[in-house]
């Protein structure tokens, strides 16, 4: 099972996404297989940081069961061969307000990701989504 690293803070604009993106890239460069998972549902931006303005696959595809394995939602990033991204964008309103059953299915699949390390960018605040993901 991958080591999961959650990056969170009570406030927005604290630097979570910058830290997550740089940490994920640094770990990839050190030789680990890394997935950056953008769970800032409703405010996902990791894809933009890596220049993937319209990712082919997003978290929405997993939540809507267009793909079954969360690992298949992790797209390769051109910046480094060891780094993949689960892009949090897609149908943002639906994702931000996902039902509990979908959230449970999502969290369960984190244990089956094919990576050494998963860095998780969690949205700001104390919503149930942020707390549950953490
Ligand atoms: N270490 C830093 N030094 C200067 N600016 C930073 C640093 N970390 C983040 N920022 C800037 O602060 C803003 C918020 O960062 P971001 O990572 O998006 O925060 P969060 O994900 O916590 O909302 C961005 O404009 C980002 O470029
Ligand atoms: Mg952020």
Image (spheres, rainbow, N blue to C red):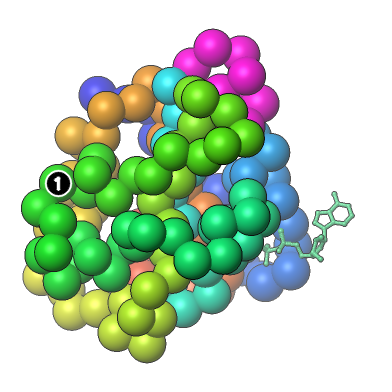
Residue 101 percent across, percent down from the top left: 10, 70
Extreme-top residue of the structure: 31
Residue 98 percent across, percent down from the top left: 25, 78
| Occupied quadrant, residue 52 | bottom right
| In magenta segment, residue 31 | yes
Residue 95 percent across, percent down from the top left: 32, 77
| Occupied quadrant, residue 39 | bottom left
Disc 1 Cβ-to-ligand 2 distance below 8 Å: no
Q: Is residue 24 above or below residue 99?
A: above
Q: Is 62 on the left or on the right of 119, as rendered?
A: left
| In magenta segment, residue 121 | no
Q: Is residue 33 above or below residue 35?
A: above
Q: Residues within 10 Å of mark 1 (few under 14, many from 20)?
A: some
Pick the front one: 2 or 90? 90
Q: Is 21 on the left or on the right of 72, as rendered?
A: right
Q: Which residue is mark 1?
A: 69
Q: Residue at x 51, y 25 (%)?
A: 81
> Quadrant of the image for the C terminus?
bottom left
> Quadrant of the image for the N terminus?
top left
Q: Is residue 46 above or below residue 78?
A: below
Q: Is 51 on the left or on the right of 130, as rendered?
A: right
Start-end of magenta stretch: 24-32
Q: Is 50 on the left or on the right of 121, as rendered?
A: right
Pick the front one: 129 or 117? 117
Pick the front one: 47 or 133? 47
Q: Is residue 107 above or below residue 21?
A: below
SS class of the residue under badge 1? loop
Q: Residue at x 69, y 45 (%)?
A: 19
Residue 66 percent across, percent down from the top left: 13, 64
Would you say residue 45 is visible in this rendering?
yes
């Amino acid at each position: 099972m991958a080591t999961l690293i959650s990056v969170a803070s009570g406030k927005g604009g604290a630097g979570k996404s910058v830290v997550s993106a740089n940490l994920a890239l640094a770990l990839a460069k050190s030789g680990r297989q890394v997935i950056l998972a953008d769970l800032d549902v409703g405010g996902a931006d990791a894809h933009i940081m890596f220049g993937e303005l319209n990712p082919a696959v997003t978290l929405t595809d997993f939540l809507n069961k267009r793909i079954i394995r969360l690992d298949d939602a992790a797209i390769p990033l051109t910046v480094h061969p060891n780094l993949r991204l689960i892009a949090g964008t897609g149908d943002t309103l639906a994702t931000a307000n996902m039902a509990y059953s979908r959230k449970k299915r999502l969290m369960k699949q984190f244990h089956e990701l094919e990576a050494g390390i998963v860095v998780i960018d969690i949205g700001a605040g104390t919503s149930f989504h942020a707390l549950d993901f953490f």
